[in-house]
Amino acid sequence: MGKNKEIGNKGESIAIEYLLKAGYRVLHTNFRRGKFEIDIIGTKDEILVFFEVKTRKNLTFGPPEDAIDDKKMNNILDCANDYILETQWLKRIRFDIISITLFPRININHIQDAFF
């Protein structure tokens, strides 16, 4: 496994632990439809939340969330739309980013309503 994949997997594990402690219910991880993927899908307070997790070792190249461009957001929106149609979800939805840096210490930044 490549180093970037290892860092990404570690970040997703950290994010899941964080979300569970914050009272979220994790429904799916790495939900795929075609070539699109959503890292984590969860619920809290009857809101369906789609999470994009970005992890970097440090801030040398800027905060992790800066790596999410319009193309990535559109891919997530397309995948989320498929999920909503499949599950017939009729309540509120939200798109959040969990931004994680690992060094010099683990730092988690939860950005709610990140896409709008």
Image (cartoon, rainbow, N blue to C red):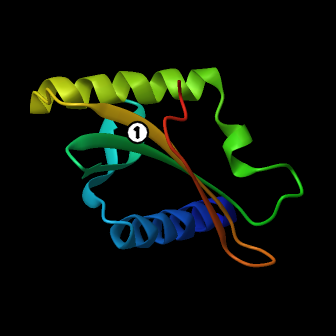
Q: Nearer the viewer, residue 7 or 74?
A: 74
Image height check: is 84 above or below 43? above
Quarter assignment of residue 78 = top left
Q: How many marks?
A: 1
Q: Does residue 89 appear to the left or right of 113 in the view shown?
A: left
Binning the other alpha carbons within 10 Å of mark 1 as few (below 14), some (14 to 19) or many (20 upward) gives some
Residue 104 image point, x, y percent = 81, 77
Residue drawn at 67 percent across, 44 percent down: 65
Residue drawn at 51 percent across, 65 percent down: 9
Please identify the residue farthest to the right as the structure is shown: 60
Q: Does residue 19 appear to the left or right of 115 in the view shown?
A: left
Which amino acid lies under the numbered mark 1 shown in the image of this protein? Glu
Q: Nearer the viewer, residue 21 or 10?
A: 21
Residue 33 image point, x, y percent = 30, 32
Residue drawn at 73 percent across, 39 percent down: 66
Residue 96 image point, x, y percent = 48, 42
Please state, as top left, top right, bottom left or bottom right, where the N terminus lies in the image.
bottom right
Please identify the residue farthest to the front as the structure is shown: 45
User: Can you identify the residue that label 1 sits on?
Assistant: 37
Quarter assignment of residue 69 = top right
Residue drawn at 18 percent across, 30 percent down: 91
Please identify the residue farthest to the left as the structure is shown: 88
Q: Nearer the viewer, residue 18 or 41?
A: 18
Residue 12 image point, x, y percent = 48, 63
Image height check: is 81 above or below 62? above
The local secondary structure at tag 1 comes to: strand
Q: Does residue 87 appear to the left or right of 73 in the view shown?
A: left
